Image (cartoon, coloured by chain):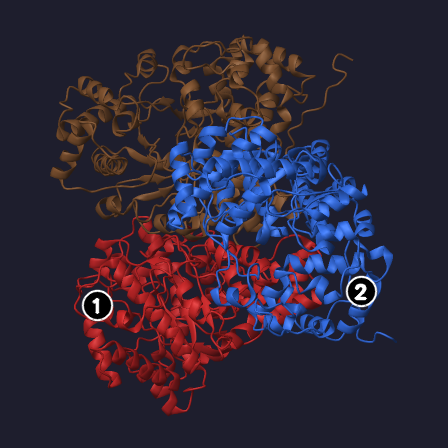
Chain colours: A brown, B blue, C red
Amino acid sequence: MTEPMAIPLNLHPDRLFHSDPAQRAIARRLYAEVRDLPIVSPHGHTDPQWYADDMPFPDPARLFIVPDHYIFRMLYSQGVALEDLGVPRADGGPVESDPRRIWRLFAQHAHLFHGTPTRLWLDHAFHDVFGVRERLTAESADRIYDQIAQQLETAAFRPRALMDRFRIEKIATTESPLDLLPHHQKMRASGWSGPGGRVVTAYRPDPVVDPEFDGWRENVRLFGELSGEDTSTWRGYLNAHRNRRAYFKDMGATSTDHGHFTARTSDLPEAEASALYAQALAGKLTPREADVFRGQVLTEMAGMSLEDGLVMQLHPGSWRSHNPSLFRTFGRDKGADIPTATDYVGALKPLLDRYGNERKLTLILFTLDETSYSRELAPLAGHYPALRLGPPWWFHDSPEGMIRFRKQAIETAGFCNTVGFNDDTRAFMSIPARHDVARRIDCRCLAELVAEHRMEEDDAREVAVDLAYRLAKKAYKL
Amino acid sequence: MTEPMAIPLNLHPDRLFHSDPAQRAIARRLYAEVRDLPIVSPHGHTDPQWYADDMPFPDPARLFIVPDHYIFRMLYSQGVALEDLGVPRADGGPVESDPRRIWRLFAQHAHLFHGTPTRLWLDHAFHDVFGVRERLTAESADRIYDQIAQQLETAAFRPRALMDRFRIEKIATTESPLDLLPHHQKMRASGWSGPGGRVVTAYRPDPVVDPEFDGWRENVRLFGELSGEDTSTWRGYLNAHRNRRAYFKDMGATSTDHGHFTARTSDLPEAEASALYAQALAGKLTPREADVFRGQVLTEMAGMSLEDGLVMQLHPGSWRSHNPSLFRTFGRDKGADIPTATDYVGALKPLLDRYGNERKLTLILFTLDETSYSRELAPLAGHYPALRLGPPWWFHDSPEGMIRFRKQAIETAGFCNTVGFNDDTRAFMSIPARHDVARRIDCRCLAELVAEHRMEEDDAREVAVDLAYRLAKKAYKL
Amino acid sequence: MTEPMAIPLNLHPDRLFHSDPAQRAIARRLYAEVRDLPIVSPHGHTDPQWYADDMPFPDPARLFIVPDHYIFRMLYSQGVALEDLGVPRADGGPVESDPRRIWRLFAQHAHLFHGTPTRLWLDHAFHDVFGVRERLTAESADRIYDQIAQQLETAAFRPRALMDRFRIEKIATTESPLDLLPHHQKMRASGWSGPGGRVVTAYRPDPVVDPEFDGWRENVRLFGELSGEDTSTWRGYLNAHRNRRAYFKDMGATSTDHGHFTARTSDLPEAEASALYAQALAGKLTPREADVFRGQVLTEMAGMSLEDGLVMQLHPGSWRSHNPSLFRTFGRDKGADIPTATDYVGALKPLLDRYGNERKLTLILFTLDETSYSRELAPLAGHYPALRLGPPWWFHDSPEGMIRFRKQAIETAGFCNTVGFNDDTRAFMSIPARHDVARRIDCRCLAELVAEHRMEEDDAREVAVDLAYRLAKKAYKL
């Protein structure tokens, strides 16, 4: 009678499979082949310090709520103040600091997440990682808080132990060229991970690529210092990239990542590119010119990828920090990034004209504009040797989002032009949940093809393993 | 042997549920919880005179065909002349006036509606409202005509009796600021409905907001007269809105509605807005400036909503009267309004920058461009406290349209950022059918989540009642 | 023991039907009604010489791989050189010429087609046309090659014999106005087909309509010679169209086809159109003016269709030859055509303003931009008497593409505003497969409506026959 109000929390073994018995039976068989495969996480935003220092995670609120914009944006949309959820203010002003109060406020609003992937991830983490067996409500909030908090203090819940438990074979973090990669260096020195090890970095040069990024000019100056190149010239700037790419590669990086507002690429003559760079340094670019400049750097990055073998990722189409008053108060990445319509066919043409037929180049395309799946991305990836399609991203990393991707992209692109799943997350505890959702949905989609006699089950079994493990490893050279 | 050719008309109790037995069983249980809930109809275009005068409806043709563009547009697309369907000409020229001939012509073409929601609504009204038990064909046309016509003459088929039978708890009509609301006044005086009663108005100011509306300048003059404000100035024009909004609120209105071509909003300094208004009065706006002006009024309306509490609705994206020769002959609303691609992320930014974080404001967004569901609307509504998503609208008020909305919007926006169903109809007899379709489809979608173990059935039951009843009542303050 | 490694190739009788038993049972019954109906193929790109000369088809590689961009684009996307697949170079340079080696290379990559419609078509042709009973793999490649090659030498596998076996009642080819139609003349002279016969032509004037087409001016000169009209003037140019349309009509054509980059139409005063034409002849059009010119010709074509009764087809939205280096080496139609976002509502307005209300005109709209189905095309076709919707086209001629079309277009357009299926193929062996996929998917979609009690099965049976046979015959006047 210690939990009189407890509402049971179940993770059903058939969850996310279609309820039709014929499809479900096939999905179960396929899933059995991939459920326990190691996790390859080639793109994400976890903190490398976790792995380097292997210190305990903080309290449940700071673990699950405060840093997760998937969660606090939903509460904010329903009138909850971010201050009350402990989200730090840019000016250091007061916000709620009692983790238990933050947790309770979240628990009171748990029903907002019905039907969302966030709910699936949370339930999975509560149930499988922490052994919680009752649903989170205002009534159960304290009990669940305690249950999680106690375990977080134990050795079995430190990052490296959880990595083992989660069967994470490889994970990439994402760093700026200005980052000295101390945590990756520490891992390398310790012999635990290091280059070619379990934790690798990825080269995300947006802070030195985007002239509209806060502090870009200062960033470019530092970039020169770090690389020993003269970044006051276009040629020196490009060499600085070469230098830092080599350093990142030395720290295990196999990929670069580019988060531009559009997918525009440019292929200017060197003199024009150089002049544009000089204008940028002088702070004189129009918004359109800034986009041309970013697009020029993308094409240069593709050329360098041909040289050094780093796989290139493009994540366009997010209007970052759409809410200016929220941005002033709380800064970036606070759930106010909104997707917009994104063209690829015209935008990528300059880069593709130059490098699209290169078999040694891999450019992985992501989108927040699902209309491009069948219209643009699948036809492009189904033709150009250099192109591959990334999995459904961000808002579309969800059961329905994944189903739409499979139904809209595969008939034209084939499975072979996709790269498996990546979790793209900062939320360590959600990693097994996210990969499990992807594996389940992929098996469900394959089971539908098999049950409808569009594919044989033996072929589907091979594809399931490709999607869960082999494609990511191969595409990202991990 | 009185009906030798009769083909039976059935309304199956499981209609619109998925045929998978597991999903269907759950859908039945959920639907049993919501089937008999009262109807809240917060947005529609029925004629308030019906409720005020409670006179019998006209003959079957004038009830079902002549005023319903969903119906006559389909026949027109297949070569039937609108004149032959009794649609009145703008010039008063001759059109078919024999309702039985109109009815027969319609019946000959009933097969055109296979697979359309119109067919579902008609069959529901024929079967449940009028007790028809045979399908409409050329052969059965006269019998069904007689069956309906006879009942329409009885007391049980007058508007108020049907309102009771349909369990309509609340219904909003839509009126122009230039409307004196005589029918609402009459209802109020009679004590039958009136403010806070069953029939309320809604403030639809397009005729005085859109400088490209026929007769806008004359409308603005009348607007000044009615409100006692000097609408030759921007400030007076805004005060006229305040005045008429207050009057509408007094007549029960809880909402405003805005049917713009784009979702553009503006937030100009007062001097600029004032100058633009002067230009508009002078008839000197370019199309782009007219759009800026409409967008400015939207932002002003949001500000007034913060003052007076009226919920704001935005219905953008319809190219009205796309067919000029049809427009010349028959006027507006003749089935020739065509949706176009609609941007929200950039368009709404001026308004959202100013009022998006207001918890006291509710701006309900509708769309005819389904690509915006997952890309723009759900991320916006899943962040801004002021935003909510309206249900699938117009062409998308259909089983597949509703399923797409649920699958594309909910994973990001959650159910909590939606506002339930509204029927948006002029066709009184279709109201129970439309709400029934929505309730069935919502239960079907929830049943799918439950059957696939993405949601527990006890939670789904609560959500079903929210979607059928509570969300609309709360969002529209009814 | 002759085929020790053989993996069986099955065509399941229930393939492409939903696996839910209730839906499947209905789908089977509906499909039984349409499975054996004759094939009407009103739009395609097969070679009329096949039918005129009735010579054997070449070897398996030249039959299935070398001419089929659906196939070689996928191998190219995975790094296979087109030269190694025997695709001819524009400069006549060396490419693989051994059909067996081409076939083996293809067989090694057969797994790339999992989940694609190409795989369904190939398996169907292998199994049903050639009696192959093992799946194509590197191991089985030679055996299957031999099995097909031997049969191709027999009389039963000549084009006319296969036409009979495939039950092709009518097939249209597509020719340029500059084509003298010798094969159609030969068929006519032989009495085997000819005008009104089984093989008809269609008028595809792009080479003389598009000023950006290679050699347009020379084409226009030849156009004048062939027609005996003075194509140095706008009026003469239009008369040349009238002349060649009449000739094509005499050779059985019932339709024209227009493959423009956009759906833009224009309706210029004659003097302006004439001046624009003069500019075009002088090679002085900007890209925008070229689009206006193409749009003007579309409107003129609609006017001529009203005169001569030819049905008009518009296929917009493909960025042809997106890959310039591939284009230089191999020429057109090499799998590098990429769809782009396509507007119809504004683009078609000039033509619709002039001819949209004509009941005697049929303009069939196709799209590669699926977002237009529910937003633009269905509302347009559900209103304008002149408009009909073509079936899912090219990349969308696939099971999921067809399901999306049915779900997104029918609720608004109705089945009556669609025109059945067309295969649009150059691949003769795929014709029965493509029509079979369409019939199965249509029956599946109808079965879903019946199983969910949205349509009665007797009505669905009529619609199934319409979709498989009657609508195409009627819309194309065949």
Q: What residue type is labelled 2?
A: Ile
Outermost residue, left side:
A271
Residue A43 location (% of width, % of height): 39, 29
Label 1 CA crowd tier, 10 Å (few <14, some 14–19, many 20+): many
Q: Quadrant of the C terminus of chain A?
A: top left
Placement of A100 over or under A21, stated as above or below: above
Give the label on residue B473, or none: none
| Residue B379 seen in render | no
Disc 1 from disc 2: Cα separation: 63 Å
Total count of labels:
2
User: What residue is shown with label 2?
Assistant: B148
Residue B34 location (% of width, % of height): 76, 41
Near-viewer residue (A407 or B426):
B426
Indicate the chain on which mark 1 is placed: C
Placement of B62 over or under A449, stated as above or below: below
Q: Residue at x 30, y 70 (%)?
A: C206
Q: Residue at x 36, y 47 (%)?
A: A381
Q: Nearer the viewer, mark 1 or mark 2?
A: 2
Q: Please give left or right for residue C99 compared with residue A369 in the image.
A: left
When asked about the image quadrant of residue C191, the answer is bottom left
Classify mark 1: helix, strand or loop.
helix
Outermost residue, right side:
B1
Residue C417 location (% of width, % of height): 55, 67
Q: Please give left or right for residue A436 compared with residue A204 in the image.
A: right
| Residue C300 seen in render | yes
Near-viewer residue (A409 or A473):
A409
Indicate the chain on which mark 2 is placed: B
Near-viewer residue (A268 or A132):
A268
Q: Which amino acid does label 1 sit on?
A: Ala
Residue B350 location (% of width, % of height): 43, 34
Label 2 CA crowd tier, 10 Å (few <14, some 14–19, many 20+): some
User: What residue is shown with label 1?
Assistant: C280
